[in-house]
Amino acid sequence: MSNISALIWLIPILPLIGFLINGMGRKQLSKGISGIIGSAVILASFILSVLVFFQVKEAGAFNVNYFDFIRLSDFKLGFEFKIDQLSSIFLLIITGIGFLIHVYSTSYMHEEPSKDFAKYFAYLNLFIFSMLLLVLGGNFVIMFIGWEGVGLCSYLLIGFWFKKPEYTSAANKAFIMNRIGDLGFLLAVFWLIAKVGTTNFDVLFAPETLKLLTANDVTGITLLLFVGATGKSAQIPLYTWLPDAMAGPTPVSALIHAATMVTAGIYMIARSNALFSLAPITQTVITVVGLATALLAASIAIKQNDIKKVLAYSTVSQLGFMFLALGTGNYTAAVFHVLTHAFFKALMFLGSGSVIHAMGGEQDIRKMGGLHKHMKITSITFLIGCLAISGIPGFSGFFSKDEILAGAYGYSSMLYGIALFAALLTAFYMFRLYFITFRGSFRGTHEQAHHLHESPAAMTIPLIILAILSVVGGAIGVPEALGGKHELAQFLAPVIKSAAHHLDHTTEYMLMALSTALVLASIFAAWSLYKNYKASGEATGFGKVLQNKWYVDELYQTAIVQPLSALGTFFNNIIEKKGIDGFVNGVGKAVNYGSRQLRLLQSGQVGAYVLLMVIGMLLLFIIQLFV
Amino acid sequence: MGNYITFPELLLWLPLVAGIIAFFLKKQGSAKAWAILSSFIILGVSVASLFFADDVKYASFNKVNYYWLKYIGNSFYLVLDSTGRLLTFLTALSFPIIFISTQQNNYKNPHSFYGLMLLTQAGLMGVFLAWDALVFYFFWELALIPVYFLCSMWGGEKRIQATFKFFVYTFAGSLLMLIGIIYVYLHTPERAFDDGHIAQHSFALQSFMHATLSTGQQTWLFWLFFAAFAVKMPIFPFHTWQPDTYDQAPTSVTMVLSGIMVKMGLFGVIRWLIPVLPDASLQFANIVIILSIIGILYASFIAIKQDNIKKLIAYSSIAHIGLMCAALFANNEMSVQGAFLQMFSHGINIIGLWIVVDMLEKQTGAKHISQLSGVAHKAPVLTIFLVVIALANIALPLTNAFVGEFLMFAGLYKANVWYAVVAGIGIILAAVYTLRMIQRVFYGESNALTQNIEDASLGQKFVLAVIVAFIFGIGIMPQPLIDLTKEAVNGLLAIKK
């Protein structure tokens, strides 16, 4: 099998080739060809990833070093890949789900002109390339290349329809917020370089290297890395770009904002678990931020009326759960939830794309309703997604969410209580979304009603595949309490030293029963409230606060953006123009004035010159006398 | 080859002679063709010189020493060494790019225009090659004077005012440096020439490095030299000539100024300031770094507020140069190596930006962000190039500037954590002003000014492709450039100890 390790470089390079072909040939290629090229390269990467996965499973992890990226006398940075259990799982998620989204896109984007169609696939391929680089990177710098790369691609894809200023503003916001996080990441890398002189994962996480770091170092580095993660994985305080990022084409939302890019922060922390486990303060911070984000985003999702916004906040909230798991040292559970979430969130985003497609671009769920009758596949698969995310037993989300909750309980029952509450909110807003969209009666225009139809096979087949995965995907992580072996945890054991508390089986059964009962109650509540939804007036009171997302965007605008902008104006108008330039021009004017006065001395009258000469000579004599 | 003619001579005399010949070519076409041809020959020589970079093996190829004013201890001493090699290459590479990208522009008095441009190139080469302080000063001024004429004769509406400001600023700086040079000269040891002549003092670089200067003398000499270099770079608060000059100078001159001439200041620090005044350089390193970092944030904030694209690029450049200056003084291998790489990368990238801005201005007559919109519809190729170059300018990974900035920040962090933290805010601000400009100018619906815009011409596509090739080439494989400058970096660090 060693031949596969020699081909690792093909996994990221193939999408890059797809990017180049589609990018360069966007004027020549027909839609069919660019769609096929764009999807085929990802399929090829996926097949290679599967082979890699089995190789890792049988023969264990391995590293590949291609060349020295930077080599100084006291610092060496290789262009190296690390292929182990963790990265091989992410390879499968990225290329597998990525491939389904590519296929789906061939149909969804069909109305774009062929030039833009090819551009779209080029960006999509570039995105996959960056994400693959991120997970393959064998040191923090190579990881950072992919890390900023996905930020760039999300910028390009969110602003894909660049004629609309609000879309490109959303794109700018995504890029800049990510960059704020990236600065944290970079500072952590510099800290590591200054302290231990390397960013290579193997060297870095070896016990003898970790010994070189003091407790303060570890806390500082991990906190900075976590700042990076809050940017990429949309946590408080850097989460506001993600809901705005829904401006991009819907499959992009599925790819970037559900299945892959936002999981980068989780991946990075799971990758660095050896470091994070040494930093209890950071772990507490991560737990609190994760939990707060889960709760905040879930509360906002309850009152959103844009189908994609609900899903976006749901993503933010679910990511919060994953950080909660990371903070409680339950790394395996976080990775597990990344996996299951990738299935059901990609499913729901693509499902929402199918709905938007059928509704002729409409995204407001108040104008939908009763869609189940017209698009059964979309409706049923979407329902499966809702069941999975809510954590109904048997569906994939149940196992991963249960593991996170159990871990939280092992930490403290208060943590568990809050997390459970957020989980109930999840079930509530997801079913609110489902009932308003698919049940009741249609509230759109006649024209829309006339055009309602199920989407073509290129869109529904990915939905069906993802729905199946959303059901059975949990099988790899069935806990011992339910007679499973948790194969995922066993597989990841060489990379992840899980520090989760283990509960006895009785407690686990009780927690499962409790959460299941409450989730069912919460779904019932959503059903009774929204089964026959009638569009009502604007929200008032607390509902309005939630609808306006707690006014966080407004807060950032007033507290951060405007003062900084004013500072720029102050520098430009006052210091630069009046201060420094004023001074320089003043000097210029003074010289000008002085020379004009001096010029008067040159009167052209010989008598005056002689007089001045005599005065000068007298002065010199006087000076000579005294000195 | 080394026995007959050397690389320093070729690099210096070729542009000088070509420039003088250009003055006699009165026709637009022939002056232009001559300038392009000779700049390519110079580039060829410079590329060849990169293959003879081994200073031990090819010493005779890279060094030349004529007697000049030996009675005052001066000789015409030129050396192409590790410190100057990359910048002479940048100079040689930039001129053909500049000539080709602006070839659709017709100048009145083309012979003088191209003649002066080539003289500027000769002056720049001289600065990067001189190992004698007097020769250095001579070329320092020789590079300035043609630029002064170029700006004042071919510039924009407010050219006289802008040029005057530029001239006074840089000339004042140069004079301070001249005083410094003479003072150091008077404290140099005597110099024995091969023919037995003994001069009391010497202008040679090595003699300057062995001048007997007390710490007190070094202190004020430092600021004399630094003034000249700081104005040239420019460093906050000596920078206000730059936005006006970039705005008013003809674009090809702006490219020379921003791509290469600002590096003269950094180069002066590397070649003269730190080696000649090592103690003072160490003593004032923190002040210089702090000034530079203030400049990074200050210029970035102003760039966010600029409506004039040319001034935006000027302020962005001030921020980038500030980082390089800070890195040079941070006194460790990473930061200094990063600065060396970035000097080259910044030159390439900013010329690329100017090419695009020049095209926009030539076609629409507009240079303000608020006047332009939706360029991407009509000129998609141009837009792609601009986006790539602009992203390189904000140091996205796998582009050339990332490697340099990464090393500089890592080095600054080693010097002092807070330097990296505060300067790092510049990374975020750079994204803000760059993306804002791209959004307003290139995205959105096209307007009356931009709806008839034409995409890049073949020649422009070619030079932009070359620039992009350098962006990714260095971004993916920076090691060859590191190897080329390693010796200079280590030499500089050795002095400081």
Image: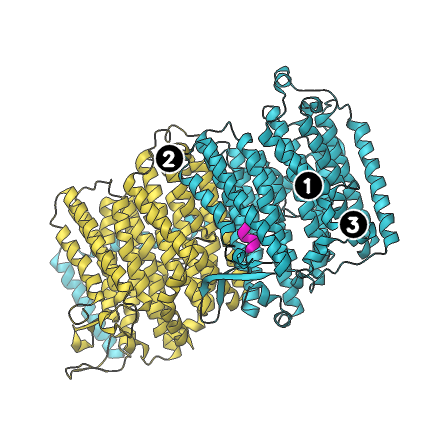
Chain colours: A cyan, B yellow
Look at 53% across and 40% down and name the residue there: A171
Along the line of sight, which residue is nearer the eye, B145 or A610? B145
Q: Which residue is mark 2?
A: B379
Residue at the disc numbered 1: A469
Choose between A42 and B440: the one closer to the eye: A42
Q: Which residue in the rendered view is the most extreme toward the front?
A: A1
Left or right? Give the position of B4 relative to B83.
left
Say which amino acid is labelled 1. Answer: Leu
Report crowding for label 1: few under 14, some 14 to 19, many 20 or more residues within 10 A (C-alpha).
many
For this rendering, which residue is in front, A431 or A412? A431
Which chain contains the residue that carries disc 1? A
Q: Residue A574 bears which disc, if any?
A: none
Q: Are marks 1 and 3 in contact (CB under 8 Å)?
A: no
Q: CA distance from mark 2 to mark 3?
A: 54 Å
User: Marks 1/3: CA distance?
Assistant: 22 Å
Q: Which chain is mark 3 on?
A: A
The quarter of the image holding the C terminus of chain A is: bottom left
Q: Which residues are magenta?
A: A132-136
Crowdedness near tag 3: few (<14), some (14–19) or many (≥20) residues, C-alpha within 10 Å? many
Q: Which residue is mark 3?
A: A405
